[in-house]
Image (cartoon, rainbow, N blue to C red):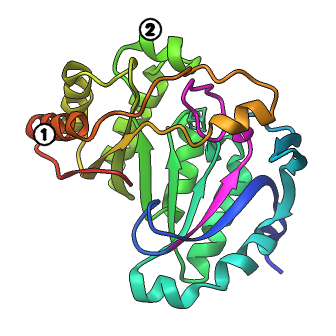
Amino acid sequence: MQDYLKKKGRIFDIQRYSIHDGNGIRTIVFLKGCVLRCRWCCNPESQSYEIQTMMVQGRPKIVGRDVTVEEVMEIVEKDRAYYRRTGGGITLSGGESLCQPEFSTALLKAAKESGISTAMESMGCAEWEIIDGLLPYLDQYLLDIKHMNPRKHKEYTGRSNELMLENAMKIARSGKTELSIRIPVIPGFNDTTEEIRDIAAYTKQLPNVKRIHLLPYHRLGQDKYEGLGRTYLMGDVPPPENNKMEELLKTAGEISGIECQIGG
Ligand code: SF4
């Protein structure tokens, strides 16, 4: 057996038949661990690398398990026929997959070697060498850009944005992977035309961007905070209205000149 198939990583879920996280029908592997703490995060159980207990509908649920690349690939392989018909494959998500660089790289490599298309959702918050090391095995990068203002980025996510923006440019310039930019639209954080315009203007400077996705804030993760004994910092903030999203979509399209869509 190839050594990289024995590589171990920590995940908290695998979801089959997803149609919102890359091209075609996909299997999503959710990795544990993230360097950000976005206030709106809908997967708070992804943030800590530690294995946790979360209360779900009054019952304790263990979140997180250690698996090998080979074990994950056994599940991913089950839907090979769907991938072939729809142009789908495997998507790494999280958390931030770059927090487990060796496991992520080995998993992408294993998929590529067995002829399965690869994608990754990530905000690019890692040393460039790590990203550069996995690009040869990555067909599609779904890269988050959340805000252009470093101070506001830090206030709402816990980290400034310089490294992520720098990496966005390097990924785009490499031309090694299909690149889509994802903007989570969060009320009170970045949901003004000015803020979306600034992100769209930066995205316009990135070569080879195929599409921009505007992802409307939703409250689906709210109960998980309670289950983890944490406070949901978004309070009662409602999701953005459809007409607001349409307005921001128009702005993003006009400024960037890139095809834009609402949703993944
Ligand atoms: S980057 Fe994603 S996974 Fe990490 S805290 Fe933010 S929303 Fe959650």
Q: Nearer the viewer, mark 2 or mark 1?
A: 1
Q: Nearer the viewer, residue 111 or 80?
A: 80
Q: Position of residue 146 (x, y in %)?
A: 40, 29
Picture quadrant of residue 14: bottom right
Residue on which disc 2 sits: 151
Q: Nearer the viewer, residue 8 or 262?
A: 262
Q: Which residues are magenta?
A: 26-47
Question: Quarter containing ligand 1?
Answer: top right
Q: Position of residue 208 (x, y in %)?
A: 24, 51
Name the image quarter holding the N terminus: bottom right
Q: Nearer the viewer, residue 173 or 108?
A: 108
Mark 1 neighbour class, 10 Å CA radius: few under 14, some 14 to 19, many 20 or more: some
Q: Amino acid at mark 2?
A: Arg
Mark 1 element type: helix
Is residue 152 visible in the rendered image? The answer is: yes
Q: Is residue 65 magenta?
A: no
Picture quadrant of residue 152: top left
Q: Which mark is residue 250?
A: 1
Determine whether 87 is above or below 151 in the image.
Answer: below
Q: Amino acid at mark 1?
A: Lys
- Please give the name of the residue rendered at 65% of the width and 29% of the height, measured from the top-left corner: 35
